[in-house]
Image (cartoon, rainbow, N blue to C red):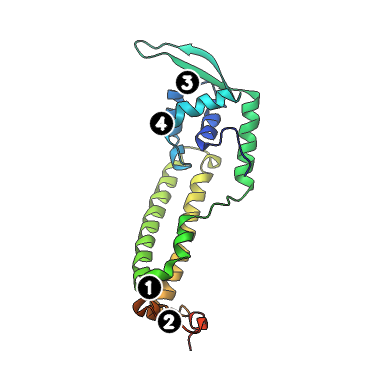
């Protein structure tokens, strides 16, 4: 991943809305929330004005006017610049075409699951699977509600989220089946190690049990 002058993903979201038309920061936040962009990427709304200021500092957006609406404070309206459009497109190309090197937290937990012992691991994985199934159900329902309202190209990130949730649920369900049936090679050696602290003399016990 290349180092960007504005690396906060909220900056990407801001560029996506001012690409359509000039906006002041409050309107940007309103539009982004209405479109559910806070579910697509980590967004800290308190950082919005700082991010907009940084985008302006680096020439990606520029102020075009200051508006006054009744007794409300003055609001600065920003539009995207040619440099901002180029940065936006390059950023999206990078996100779509490259693999994020940061491993998911779940993978880190799996790499050390041995410390829990088989029975505790089964319990926690059942909890995770229930949450994944619930999430998939909510995502599926939300997607069906949105399909009549907008073209599919604006829903592909929702489809992706659902596909990833379902894929993880399938994997967890399969691993759970191996654990609960005893089919996982080395599970009894793992259980003895957890219960007694006895490390197998032959690590082959953890690979295959006779």
Q: Which mark is residue 117?
A: 1
Whole-angstrom CA distance, mark 2 to mark 3, is: 62 Å
Find residue 178 and report its horizontal and vertical position in percent: 44, 75
Secondary structure, mark 2, is helix
For marks 4 and 1, give the CA distance. Answer: 42 Å
Viewer can see residue 187: yes
- The Cα–Cα distance between marks 1 and 2, rounded to whole angstroms, is 10 Å
Q: In this rendering, would 71 be left or right of 162? A: left
Q: Nearer the viewer, residue 153 or 196?
A: 196
Where is 129 relative to 22, above or below?
below
Q: What percent of the width, then of the height, locates residue 6?
A: 56, 33
Q: Crowdedness of circle 3 by 10 Å Cα count: few (<14), some, many (20+)?
A: many
Q: How many marks?
A: 4
Secondary structure beneath label 1: loop
The secondary structure type at the circle numbered 3 is loop
Q: CA distance from mark 4 to mark 3?
A: 15 Å
Q: Which residue is mark 4?
A: 46
The nearer-to-camera label among 1 and 3 is: 1
Q: Residue 24: give its label.
A: 3
* Label 4 secondary element: helix
Instruction: Give the mark, 1 or 2, whose residue is nearer the N terminus.
Output: 1
Q: Is residue 34 at all visible to an observer of this figure?
A: no
Q: Is residue 20 left or right of residue 26?
A: right
Disc 2 + disc 3, Cβ < 8 Å: no
**Mark 2 — residue?**
189
**Could you classify mark 4 by the number of other residues whose Cα lies within 10 Å: few (under 14), some (14-19), or many (20 or more)?**
few
Task: Classify 10 Å Cα crowding around label 2: few (below 14), some (14-19), many (20 and above).
Answer: many
Could you tell me how far apart the alpha carbons at marks 1 and 3 are, in whole angstroms?
54 Å
Q: First in sequence, mark 4 or 1: give its number.
A: 4
Q: Earlier in the sequence, mark 2 or mark 3?
A: 3
Which residue corresponds to the image point at 47% horizontal and 52% vertical from the top-left? Answer: 162
């Amino acid at each position: 991943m290349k180092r960007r002058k504005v690396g906060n993903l909220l900056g990407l979201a801001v560029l996506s809305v001012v690409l359509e038309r000039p906006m002041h920061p409050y309107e940007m936040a309103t539009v982004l929330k209405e479109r559910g962009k806070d579910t697509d990427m980590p967004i800290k709304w308190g950082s919005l004005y700082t991010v907009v200021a940084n985008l302006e500092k680096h020439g990606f957006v520029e102020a075009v006017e200051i508006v006054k609406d009744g007794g409300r404070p003055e609001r600065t309206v920003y539009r995207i610049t040619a440099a901002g459009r180029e940065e936006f497109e390059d950023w999206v190309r990078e996100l779509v075409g490259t693999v994020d090197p940061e491993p998911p937290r779940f993978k880190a937990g799996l790499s050390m699951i041995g410390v829990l012992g088989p029975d505790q691991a089964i319990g926690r994985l059942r909890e995770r699977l229930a949450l994944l199934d619930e999430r998939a159900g909510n995502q599926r329902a939300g997607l069906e509600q949105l399909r009549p309202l907008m073209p599919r190209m604006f829903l592909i990130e929702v489809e992706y989220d659902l596909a990833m949730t379902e894929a993880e649920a399938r994997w967890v369900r399969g691993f759970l089946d191996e654990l609960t049936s005893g089919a996982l090679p080395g599970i009894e050696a793992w259980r003895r190690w957890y219960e007694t602290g006895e490390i197998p003399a032959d690590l082959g016990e953890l690979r295959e049990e006779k």
